[in-house]
Amino acid sequence: MKDAILAHLRYGLGKDASHSSVYDWRMALSHALRDRAVDHWIPSTQTTYARKAKRVYYLSMEFLIGRLVEDMAANLGATEEARAALAELGQDFDTLVRDEPDAALGNGGLGRLAACFMDSLATLGIPAMGYGIRYEHGLFEQDFVDGQQIEKPETWLSQKHAWEFERPEVQYSITFGGHVEHHDGRAHWHPHETVFATAHDTPVIGWQGRWGNTLRLWSAQPVKIFDLASFNRGDYLAASRSEALARTICRVLYPDDTTETGKELRLKQEYFFTAASIQDLIRRFLVTHDDIRRLDEAAAIQLNDTHPAIAGPELVRLLVDVHGLGMGEAIDLARRCLGYTNHTLLPEALERWPEWLFGRVLPRHLEIIREIEATQQAEFAGSPRILDHGNVQMGELAFIMAHKVNGVSALHTDLVKQTLFSDLHRIHPTRIINQTNGITPRRWLHTCNPALSGLITGAIGDGWVADLEQLKALKGKTGDAAFLSDFMAAKRHNKERLSNWVQQTLGQSIDPDAMFDVQIKRIHEYKRQHMNILETIALWNEMKANPGAGWQPRVKIFGGKAAPGYHVAKEIIHLINDVATVINNDPATKDLLQIVYPPNYNVTMAEMLIPAADLSEQISTAGKEASGTGNMKFALNGALTIGTLDGANVEIREHVGAENFFLFGLTAQEIMEARKQPGFARATIEKSPRMQRVLQQIAEGRFSPGDASRYHGFVGNLWDHDYFCVSLDFDNYYDTQRRADEAFGHRDAWAAMALTNTAGMGWFSSDRTIQGYARDIWDVGPADAKTLEKTG
Ligand code: 7GP
C-alpha cells in the first residue's frame, strides 16, 4: 500500500513526497485503492460476459454518493492497512478523508436510495450497472445570511474526480427536435440537434471485495467543437448550437426534491441519459446474443421514478425503427424489460409535459406514445390516458410500460393502489407490488459509527455487516448492564465528537449530556419542520413559566436545504434561525434548551449527526412521506423515534416494538377525513391555548424584533389552511415529547430501548430490499456461484 501510494504520487501526479499537498496525498491514496478495486471489478465483468448473465440496469437521474474514500477502503478491507501506510509516510488517513468533496449528485431520499442500492447490488454479487448524469455542479451549497438561505454553486469537479475512468471510446449520439417522415414502410426521424454522450465509469465494490459493478455517468460533448463553415458565414449561433447544448445539458442538477417544474432542459437531460443508457445496454446485449427479441432474458431495466420513463418509448423506437420489430411485439418486449418505482404521491411532483413541448423535443417519441396509448385503449377500453388534456403524463406512461410497479413502503404502496393509480390498478391488479426501502449497513453503521460498530462486532462477530438480521442477537443483551453501559458510552463518544464540531464550526456550546433531538432532511411543509420549531417555542414558554420543574435539557438539531423556488420552505428556515437567535441567548434557559442549525446539510454531515442522535424526528403528515430512509439510519444507530404512522415508520415500529417508539398523530385515513371539514385548523387552534400562544408570539414579532410582519403570511396560513395539519397533531406531539423527556431521565431503561432499536433494525438493510427486487421484479441472482455461497 505504501509503495502504491508513493508510485501514484510520483507517476500519476508528478509529485515528490516532500512537495505534496493534502490533495495530492488523497489522490494518491484514492488511486492506490482504485487499483485494488479494479482487481475485483474486471473479473466480475468477465464472469458476467462469460456466463451471459442477466444484468440489472438502474436508471436514475440522481446518485447521492457522498465521499468514497472510507467506503471504498472499508469494502476492500483495506482501512487499517491504508491508515498504517499513511502513518509511515507522515500522513493522517482521517485528514485525507475530510479533504474529499461530498459528491452531491442528488437531492435527497431518491438519490441516496440509488447509492445504497449500488452498494447492495455489489455486495450481493448481482451484475448491475447504475446509469445517470455526470453533473458538473451537484446540489447547491447552502449558507445562511441573516438567518436566510442563500445558494452557492457546488463545484465538486473543480478537482479531479479520483474514482472515475473516462471512456472517450464509449460514445453515443443523442438527437433532439426536427421532424419525422414515413416512407419505405418505416419512420425516419430527422433531428435538429445532436450531442454526444460519453461514459465515465466508477467501480462499485461490494463488502469484502466480493463483486464489482459499475456506476456509469454520462457527460455531453458537442458534435463539432466549432463549425468553421457557419462561423465564416457569420452564423455564430448555428456554429455553437451543439456546443451550447452540450455545455448546458450536464451543467447542473435540478435542485428540486418533491417540487417539480416542467422545463425543456430537464426533459432534455432525462432523454439524454436515458437514450445513451438504452443504446449502451443494447450494444452490450448484442456482444453475446444475436436475437434482440430475447433482450428481456439479459436485461432488467429499473426506472427510479418517472425521470427516465422515456426509456419505454425509446426502447420501442430502437426495436421498431432500427431492429425492425413490429410495434406490438416491441411494446411487449419493452414491458418485459422495464420496472418502475414510484417515490411520491405529492401531485406537484408528478411529471407531466405539455404535448407541444414534448413533440418539439421528441417528435418520434410522441408518435410512439400515441401507438402505446392506442394499444392500451384497444386492450383495456376506458384505461387511464397517457395523453390527457394536452399533457404527456409520465406516471401513466411508466406504469403502462412496466411489468411491475412498486411503492417504497407498505403504507405508500397501499396508497398508490388506492389513490394515485387506482384505475390502472383495477385493470392490472397484480402489477403494483411493495418493496420497502432499506439502507446500506456498510456506510450507515459500520463506517459512520466506529464506536458502536466495534462494540457490536466484539459481541457478535462481524457477520452482521453483510447479514444485518444478525443484529437480532443483541436482543439478548438488553438486560446486560455492562453491555448497556458500553452501548451508552459509544453514544456519548459520538455526542462529544458532534459537540466539538459544533463548537469549532458554529462557535456554539452544547452539552453532550442533553438529549440530542435531530431532524435532518429536505425542508418541506409535509415533513413539518415548522411543527418542530413551534413545539420548541412552546417548550421554552413552559420552561420559563415553571423554572423549577426539573426540565430535561435538550439540543434541537436541524439540517436541510429548501428548493430555491420554494418560498414557504425558505420561510421555515428563516423562522428556525430567528427562533434560535432568541432562545439560544436567553440566560434563563440557555443551559436547558439550545437550537443548532448548521448550514449545508449533506451526506457527510449526516454521517456525523446520525450516530450522535438520541431522538429521531419523523413527524410528516401521515400519508405524505412515501417511506423515509433517514428514519432507518437513526433507529439502526440506537436513536428512538418520535413519529407519525407514515411511510416506513409503520414498519420500523413493528420491528422495534411499539413500546420503543414514541408514536403520535392522526393516521393517513384520519387526515383525509379531517381535511374535508372547512375551517378545521381555526377550530382546532382555538381549542389549543398552547399553540395559540406560540402563533401569537411569532405574529407579534417576538422572534423578528423590528419586523413584526415577517411571519404574518406564515401564521395566517396555519390558521386558515394548514394543509399539512400541524394544528391537528400539535398538542399530541407536544405531550409525546414530554413522554420522551421523562423516558430519557431513566437512563438504564432508555439504553435498553435504544439497544432494542438497533437489534430490531436488521430487516431494513438495503440488501433485503435488493433481494426483493431481484426476486419479484428482475428475476436475477448472483452471477457467480462463489459469491452465491458467500452471500447465502
Ligand atoms: C423520496 C421520498 O420522499 C422518501 O419518502 C423516500 O424515502 C425516498 O424517495 C426514497 O424512496 N422521494 C424523493 O426524493 C423524490 O424526489 C420525487 O421524489 C420524484
Image: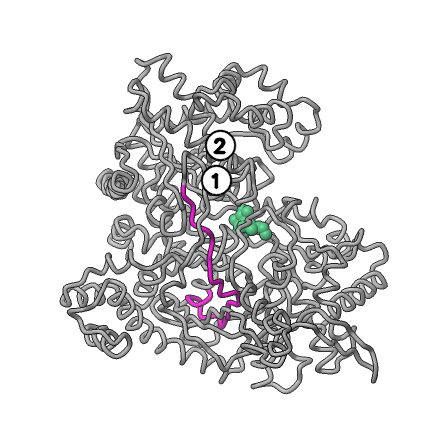
- What amino acid type should be assigned to the residue bearing mark 2? Leu
Residue nearer the viewer, 284 or 163: 163
User: Left or right: where does residue 482 sit relative to residue 735?
Assistant: left
- What amino acid type should be assigned to the residue bearing mark 1? Arg
How far from the left and from the top, in percent, is residue 561? 47, 44
Task: Say which quadrant the C terminus sits in.
Answer: bottom left
Residue nearer the viewer, 601 or 730: 601
Q: Is residue 556 above or below residue 460?
A: above
Q: Secondary structure at mark 1?
A: helix
What is the distance, in whole Å, between disc 2 and disc 1 at their CAs?
Answer: 9 Å
Disc number placed over residue 333 in the picture, else none: none
Q: Dividing the picture into quarters, in which one does residue 737 lie?
A: top left
Q: Is mark 1 within 8 Å of ligand 1?
A: no
Q: Secondary structure at mark 2?
A: strand
Q: Dividing the picture into quarters, in which one does residue 357 lie?
A: bottom right
Disc number placed over residue 653 in the picture, else none: 1
Residue 190 visible, this orientation: yes
How far from the left and from the top, in percent, is residue 626? 57, 46
Q: In the rendered structure, which segment of residues is drawn in magenta? A: 121-143
Residue nearer the viewer, 315 or 457: 315
User: Left or right: where does residue 557 sit relative to residue 171?
Assistant: left
How far from the left and from the top, in percent, is residue 436? 54, 52
The residue located at (38%, 63%) in the rendering is 158
The residue located at (63%, 57%) in the rendering is 306
Name the residue beneath numbered marker 2. Answer: 663
Q: Is residue 111 inside the magenta stretch?
A: no
